[in-house]
Image (cartoon, grey):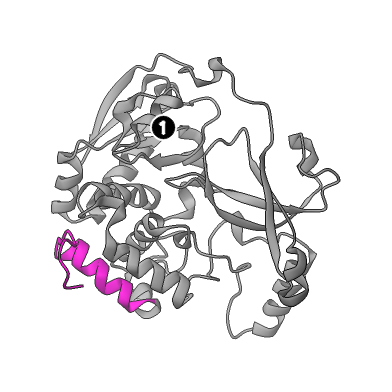
């Protein structure tokens, strides 16, 4: 399983490959996934694989592994691959002042559009009115497609992302907007959040980029991300709803069974704890935890734990204080008093 981020998809580290590096996607089918690394250029048709080996002389001292090479698996894209697959025609919807441009093909099954617009309204109502106004005034739209070829799910395109959009054959005017690449993906995943939760996540990216000082480079968000994720290690292992919580191998199945047996009637163990998606980078940290913060009731709103503001205050009060300044006080975090 991979999740798109602002900058790309995670590297996957495999073990048990007969050929290193592999030449075909089929070679990865029987390999064991042993880890993930950072983020890289996003192209789901050509996954990136890394090769690791003993670190020579130093491996005997520290048991270290070192990166040997990175390799793209799959056929190189052709010029045709980068051209738009469809001359998109849009119909405009609105939700609490936020513009939604919908690919007219989506209306062939219009109930999906109606559900998505309703979720957008629910998401916008979670945000303070000044935040919705800031997002709208920055020109942010939500653009919904029936499909876009190889692209899947939903993301926010940063304001400085025109060159990437151009290289992929998309309209440069999507910079600063949320794009849903394939409506069916949203319909399939929406139950993992409270109503509109994944849209709150994307609109939080927009607010971060368009309103906070220095956008996604805001130093206060970056500092808190570094402390919470790397120093305090709060987000190394948390509960997550959906298929990511399922055991990936026999060892995880045994561990989950033992935990469930040990807990007995004392508590429920729903699945395997995972590294929080908020740990990906500072932008995802802000968007993920904002989704929890903006849920002011006891609903398990966000896909990842903590699921709501009450849980976030208990789990990570320092981040909650920062989000309170951003969302409730409307601060752009543009001074040195943090």
Left or right, residue 321 beside residue 254: left
Q: Quadrant of residue 302?
A: bottom left
Q: Is residue 272 visible?
A: yes
Instruction: Give the image quarter of residue 330.
Output: bottom left
Name the residue: 55% across, 20% down: 81
Mark 1 neighbour density, 10 Å: few (under 14) some (14–19) many (20 or more): some
Q: Residue at x 73, y 68 (%)?
A: 252
Q: Magenta segment range?
A: 316-338
Query: Does the stretch in magenta take in 324?
Result: yes
Let me know if residue 298 appears in the view: no
- What's the residue at 49%, 17% (across, down)? 85
28 vs 289, nearest the viewer? 28
Q: Position of residue 27 (x, y in %)?
A: 80, 40
Name the one closer to the observer, 12 or 20: 20
Q: Position of residue 176 (x, y in %)?
A: 28, 38
Looking at the image, residue 281 lies above or below residue 252: above
Q: Quadrant of the C terminus?
A: bottom left
Question: What residue sits right under mark 1 in the picture?
Answer: 164
């Amino acid at each position: 399983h991979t999740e798109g981020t602002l900058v790309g998809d995670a590297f996957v580290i495999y073990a048990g490959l007969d050929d290193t590096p592999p030449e075909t996607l089929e070679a990865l089918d029987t390999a064991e996934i042993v880890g993930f690394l950072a983020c890289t250029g996003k192209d789901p048709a050509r996954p990136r694989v890394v090769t690791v080996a003993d670190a020579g002389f130093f491996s005997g001292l520290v048991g270290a592994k070192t990166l040997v090479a990175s390799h793209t698996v799959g056929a190189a894209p052709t010029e045709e691959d980068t051209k738009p697959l469809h001359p998109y025609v849009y119909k405009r919807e609105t939700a609490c002042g936020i513009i939604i441009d919908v690919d007219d093909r989506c209306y062939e099954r219009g109930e999906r559009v109606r559900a998505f617009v309703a979720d957008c309204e629910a998401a916008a109502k979670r945000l303070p009115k000044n935040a919705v106004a800031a997002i709208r005034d920055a020109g942010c739209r939500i653009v919904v497609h029936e499909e876009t070829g190889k692209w899947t799910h939903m993301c926010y395109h940063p304001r400085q992302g025109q060159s990437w959009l151009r290289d992929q054959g998309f309209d440069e005017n999507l910079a600063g907007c949320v794009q849903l690449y394939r409506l069916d993906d949203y319909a399939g995943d929406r139950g993992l959040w409270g109503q509109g939760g994944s849209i709150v996540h994307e609109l939080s990216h927009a607010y971060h980029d368009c309103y906070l000082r220095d956008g996604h480079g805001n130093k206060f968000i970056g500092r808190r991300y570094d402390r919470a994720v790397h120093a305090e290690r709060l987000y190394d292992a948390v509960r997550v709803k959906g298929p990511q919580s399922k055991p990936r191998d026999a060892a995880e199945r045994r561990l989950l069974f033992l935990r469930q047996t040990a807990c007995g009637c004392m508590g429920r163990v729903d699945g395997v704890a995972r590294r929080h998606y908020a740990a990906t980078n500072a932008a995802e940290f802000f968007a993920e935890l904002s989704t929890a913060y903006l849920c002011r009731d006891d609903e398990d709103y966000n896909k990842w734990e903590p699921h709501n503001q009450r849980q976030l205050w208990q789990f990570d009060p320092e981040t909650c204080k920062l989000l309170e300044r951003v969302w409730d006080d409307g601060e752009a975090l543009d001074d040195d008093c943090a």
